[in-house]
Amino acid sequence: MFKRFFSKKKEVDIIENISSEEKNQFTEEVETNVEVETEEKKEENKFEPNKIDWLINDSILTFMPRELYMHYWDNNTEKNLQDPSWQNQSVYFWNNSEPFERKSLPEFFENFEKKLFVFHEVPDYISLVSAKAIPWFGMPGEGDKFCLRYDDQPITLEEAHKLNIIKYVEIIELNYENLGVLNDRDNYCFLIDPKEVTFENQLFYLNGEKISLAELYQKKKLLVLSVQ
């Protein structure tokens, strides 16, 4: 009797083990399928600029031929005209494309806010001056460091903003959720660098070669901006 009981118990254990293995296998297959579906969905939703070329080419946004500049900003830095840290946030600025190591700034500046702007209306009495950053803080320097002056006196970027000399902007990265901005010329515009991109006879040229707006966008030579 005992032999029969244990024999049946062994059969039950075997059945339960098989059932458990099948269940685990099923769970693993489901999880694998979910992962595959998730990856496929991500791949489907992955933004590819060439899929919306016609939207960019047919956009009604106006063009702003300007160079894009930036300056650093940290709310915790106290105003001090003699403090280089404050000066490098409130007076001096750089081309947005200038590599950080060419600016000869302390490494902690990379953690500061980066404020982008373009020139809007520059009076004749305001001059733009520049100088090469000297090697400092273990950086090679040699980047172009700019500031605005009036009668040889520096003008802060805050003052320049109040005088409408500069306008702050934000770069809008196109995705499938915000393509409507391409038809909102009241709040957005295209930015092209006039030193790189020219417009002649209704055509755009990059390095002397004819190019479409969509191609310019893919090469990051055409930016969509929100002007603040």
Image (cartoon, rainbow, N blue to C red):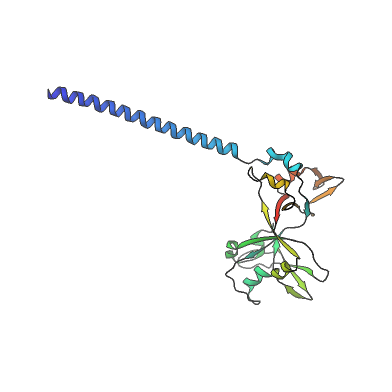
Residue 143 in the image: x percent, y percent?
70, 63
Q: Quadrant of the C terminus?
A: bottom right
Left of 54 or right of it: where is 74? left
Residue 219 visible to an observer of this rendering: no
Q: Is residue 150 above or below residue 174?
A: below
Q: Residue at x 46, y 34 (%)?
A: 32
Quarter residue 76 falls in: bottom right
Left of 56 or right of it: where is 25? left
Q: Residue at x 58, y 37 (%)?
A: 43
Q: Quadrant of the N terminus?
A: top left
Quarter residue 154 falls in: bottom right
Quarter residue 10 falls in: top left
Front residue (pair 33, 141): 33
Q: Residue at x 48, y 35 (%)?
A: 34
Q: Is residue 48 above or below residue 24?
A: below
Q: Residue at x 59, y 36 (%)?
A: 44
Left of 137 or right of it: where is 186? right
Residue 199 in the image: x percent, y percent?
83, 49
Residue 222 in the image: x percent, y percent?
73, 49
